[in-house]
Amino acid sequence: MIKKILVANRGEIAVRIMRTCREMGIHSVAVFSEADRRSMHVRYADEAYFIGPSPSNESYLVIEKIISAAKKAKADAIHPGYGFLSENAEFSDRCKKEGIIFIGPSAESIASMGDKITARRTIIKAGVPVVPGTTDPITNDKEAVKIIKSIGLPVMIKASAGGGGKGMRLVKNETEIVPSIRAAKSEAMAAFGNDAVYIEKYIESPHHIEFQILADKHGNVIHLFERECSVQRRHQKVIEETPSPLMTPEIRKEMGDHAVAVARAAKYDGAGTIEFIVDDRLNYFFLEMNTRLQVEHPITERVVGIDLVREQINIANGLKLTYEQEGLSQNGHAIECRIYAEDPDNNFMPSPGRIQHITEPLGFGVRHDGYVYEGFEIPIYYDPLISKLIVWGKTRPEAIARMKRALHSYKITGVKTSIKFLEKIMNAPDFVEGNYNTHFIEKNKSFLEDKETCQGDCKAMAIIAAFIDYHNRIAQTQQKVAQVKSGSEWKSKNRKKNLLRM
Amino acid sequence: MIKKILVANRGEIAVRIMRTCREMGIHSVAVFSEADRRSMHVRYADEAYFIGPSPSNESYLVIEKIISAAKKAKADAIHPGYGFLSENAEFSDRCKKEGIIFIGPSAESIASMGDKITARRTIIKAGVPVVPGTTDPITNDKEAVKIIKSIGLPVMIKASAGGGGKGMRLVKNETEIVPSIRAAKSEAMAAFGNDAVYIEKYIESPHHIEFQILADKHGNVIHLFERECSVQRRHQKVIEETPSPLMTPEIRKEMGDHAVAVARAAKYDGAGTIEFIVDDRLNYFFLEMNTRLQVEHPITERVVGIDLVREQINIANGLKLTYEQEGLSQNGHAIECRIYAEDPDNNFMPSPGRIQHITEPLGFGVRHDGYVYEGFEIPIYYDPLISKLIVWGKTRPEAIARMKRALHSYKITGVKTSIKFLEKIMNAPDFVEGNYNTHFIEKNKSFLEDKETCQGDCKAMAIIAAFIDYHNRIAQTQQKVAQVKSGSEWKSKNRKKNLLRM
Amino acid sequence: MALEINIDGQSVSVELLGKNGDKHQVSIDGKVYLVDLVMVEKGVYSMLYKNKSYNVELAVGKTPKSYTISTLYNSYDVDILDAEAKYLRNRKHDHLGDNMAISSPMPGKVVKILVKKGDKVKAGDTVIIVSAMKMESEYKVKSDRTIKNVLVKEGDTIDGNQPLIMIE
Amino acid sequence: MALEINIDGQSVSVELLGKNGDKHQVSIDGKVYLVDLVMVEKGVYSMLYKNKSYNVELAVGKTPKSYTISTLYNSYDVDILDAEAKYLRNRKHDHLGDNMAISSPMPGKVVKILVKKGDKVKAGDTVIIVSAMKMESEYKVKSDRTIKNVLVKEGDTIDGNQPLIMIE
């Protein structure tokens, strides 16, 4: 059984994993770069090892350094979190060779699902619907034009090794086909070192719905229902919820069965996510599989009541799943908002900096997974995710009301955050009615950018607070100067006010 | 419908109530005494009214002042929280006369359940078992000796108007009867201004188990299952959990039905709690009814999934309950720990003072209901409750592991707290096995008082931290003095370090 | 004490008329406010005005005399204009015609510099690329200009609002 | 700099041997520790020693030279004994024989004073009752004594450890 886990990650996810380690009586080991000495994951862990300079390609992404730290710490296992090395087949393989348990799938599963073209082939064989398109990389422009005509415009050109919207091009007109393929290839090469691209039918009103699966090493696979992830900005998820307002029990069952089939086809074990694209008429197509924990996994934990990190560790220990599909159900409704250090008033420009003050929302039905604290400087080198706010309600309207309440009392000063933008989304009629797809933010742009104005005297209060604060600071400084100059600070008999005597 | 609620309370419960108000779109009004200007409930509320000096009998307990604030604020309703005026029949009545909705039961219900002797009579009529004893106040010593002999020793002498262990005497021997009655009477008179006492059979291995009920104004009554509250110190609850490890489904149903019968007998509406005393063989007896929200209500909220404050407000609005008994179930296991400002190493002496630093536990399955913040000075005038930590787990062992994890990462400096004591309880074999009654703390005294010692170099680290901190403080002060004396602080060209120039 | 305060570009005159404990009597452009104000946490004020409860959070800005102030829904940029600030502002205005600095509003790392001292650039040309939190931002000139000086080099870690490239 | 430090009644000698960034080389009674130490929040230190992660929280105590220090499970009372502290301690010892003060370890309110100046009290007699947080505590004398002075009156709000009644 695993007794010590090295968490090869940072930020909120590293802390989140260590919490479960502690609940299981497992020792946790942190690794940290120069920029992260003060990070919460270093403080929360039982042990911590320095792994190099701040840029992630000199620290968190260097397999050698992670392995070396794991050996020094005598860790039995490594949990990769998400991002960084979590979907790196070479790393999974290397752990195996070193006799360290990799808490995630085998190199073969990662490789087969990591390459989108290979994944498509596997999935088609398993009888799961995929978006019409090619399974081979495009090698020839003329052939590509022919294929695209047979699929029918619009189509997407996508990088085989891609993700995060890079190496992706939407083609609406015939004349755009060849330039788009070239642009996608060059972007894919720059981003992933691999210029393979393929073609997919473009779904006009797409919903992004994913299924959480768990598979043990004994051939048992279950799904933990769906997550609706259609609220996206620049192909990045902003808000997720479960159940999906779009879903029906029949389609849920069908998609769940297909998700399980995908995991079986990939000979997968561990926790994974099957992403589907769904149109308004509930036609669904396999999009890709994420062979790791997702950022948005807490909403599933909340409605299903299962700690996914605990399950990952149990599976890595070779234990059988203790849940059966029939015994699982969704209880209530959960929503997650991702809080980013970014400026919604300024084109979502990243906003690193020092946290001056933070008030975290608490109370019934609120979970807050973060890692920053007062005085912490958010590094410029990594993802701008500050925290995730997860709420639960018996019903979807109750969950929305609770999220509004939580966002309202969530205050961070020192860096700009997306909190107000998220509040606007909670108030947008399309969201409230559950009537949205991945075009939601674009469609509601003017509503979301409209600034709430203060009813009352906010502006006057702001002026008065600034004035009094400045006034008091000056008075204090003057007093201190006077004291020091007259030497009175050193003669004072008042012990209480004189905090430090030498 | 209620649009504005005055919360006639302070501390965590005031904030907790205001959170639900916000979720329901209801404006919240705080009242505060001199000591509470900086309290979180004043900051969280939409409006705040000053009601007088710090001692509660000059502010929070003065009906006139609360009513006057409610009128000024034009509040539709008053929520009394727990403690203070929450079980004051006169206050309920006064609200009614002023046309303000009292979020709680009628004066009649409070009065009939508030006096323990009257309550016993009502309950016996409703066919609910009560502890063998008298229903009339004791007036005659000889008569009392006779009654006690017929019930059989040991017995408890209890104050009719009592609570919190005052005016209570355990009698084990015949010779103690008369002195005990006299002592109980005199204590009752001093504490409650009423010397009526009665006799009850003393249950040797008592469990304290209570049922949450909800009753609307249309005759619908449901119960939301039990809370096990046997972990007590000096008759004060320390830890509560649900479900009770003692309970069987059959007894749960029977007690639940009886709890509903009590509420009906009292013509009750609102949220209330029926307390039972249960012996090891699951014989149970009605103890008393609390006609208000309980401190420990969140564990019920967590496993049943219902916001009890929302239900209270809905009931006060005259709405019908939307739940039926058959549709309710307990999902998983919840535990609450009460965090007090008290010193477990020093006989639980209250420890008011200024919060220097606080790290709140977060993550999956953790709810934290508090009201203090860094720099806040806990007043000496009120209850030492700082916060309530509530965890949920799919199973009881999972909930215990989570509570241990949460307590481990919950840090408060500046005041002494009961956190470490609570951690010890979570590790006590009797608690872990669910094998405990109200004698638990006394029985496990030596285990609970045994100090955990640090494995490793904690002491050396403490010494080094103190040394370096002192060292750096001296260095800083010396630098400042040197700067001021040489005038360099005013000439400095380094704008960054020179925070304030005049 | 009376001070001029600039809030989101608008200038107001503020004066403390009286103080009794936490109660402050303050006039803003002649309008008098009686406010119960206490600093509850560092930089956080609880204010009661006409029994409404306001939480106002102050973050000191780029200079010790500038604040970013957050109220319930709004965020304001506030500058205290005392004699020194006014003097500095005037002096700044004098220079503004000659030089302009390209800067990034956020801290980050210089990824690429596309110009050198003396280069002539055209409106819309990118002069520098800065990266922060996995996102790259390109900074362009708005009109035809000459590069007067390059103050940083590739790989440098920079502060928010630090001048990076001076243009004429 | 070397200092004498008293931890839970035990005295140790501590010296800073060297410092390189966050790495501190400190000796305690001759044993050398190489510790990576940073103050992450006010009064909160993150320390790495032999790759173990320690969080140590300091609260300044009754005097600026005393701390209450919390590590994972333990809480320590620490006093810095510099020249001044030693002098004061010695002086205190000289006086200890003559006078003793009754004080409450917690802040609170004086509910009742049962003695006056000059009263003779017996071992176990209650002299004062203090209330805090709805709980009353009685303070008694441990042996037969004479009341030298009563420093507070009923209704007073008192600090923790403030002398309330002086006894001979």
Image (spheres, coloured by chain):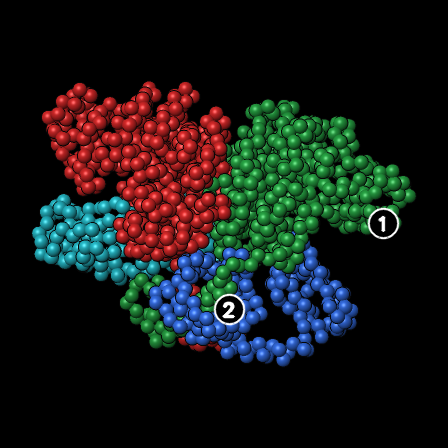
Chain colours: A red, B green, C cyan, D blue
Classify mark 1: helix, strand or loop: helix
Q: Quadrant of the N terminus of chain B?
A: top right
Q: Quadrant of residue C159?
A: bottom left
Question: Is residue D125 at all visible to an observer of this figure?
Answer: yes
User: Which of A127 and D147 lies nearest the eye of the viewer?
Assistant: A127
Q: Quadrant of residue B284?
A: top right
Q: Position of residue A452 (x, y in %)?
A: 37, 38
* Same subunit, tags 1 and 2: no
Classify mark 2: helix, strand or loop: loop
Q: Which residue is mark 1?
A: B176
All told, the count of numbered labels is: 2
Residue occupying the point 43% across, 65% down? A476
Q: Which residue is mark 2?
A: D64
Q: Amino acid at mark 1?
A: Glu
Around disc 2, counting alpha carbons within 10 Å, would you say few (fewer than 14), some (14 to 19), or many (20 or more)?
A: some
Residue occupying the point 34% across, 76% down? B486
Q: Answer above or below: position of A264 versus B65.
A: above
Residue B386 is labelled as none
Q: Nearer the viewer, mark 1 or mark 2?
A: 1
Q: Amino acid at mark 2?
A: Pro
Residue occupying the point 30% across, 51% down? A64
Q: Position of residue A488 (x, y in %)?
A: 46, 75
User: Which of B82 and A466 lies nearest the eye of the viewer?
Assistant: B82
Residue occupying the point 69% across, 40% down? B207
Q: Quadrant of the C terminus of chain B?
A: bottom left
* Drawn side of residue B35 relative to residue A8, left or right: right
Determine the residue located farthest toward the right in the rendered image. Answer: B142
* Drawn side of residue A13 relative to residue C134, left or right: right
Chain under disc 1: B
Chain under disc 2: D
Q: Answer above or below: position of A204 versus A102.
A: above
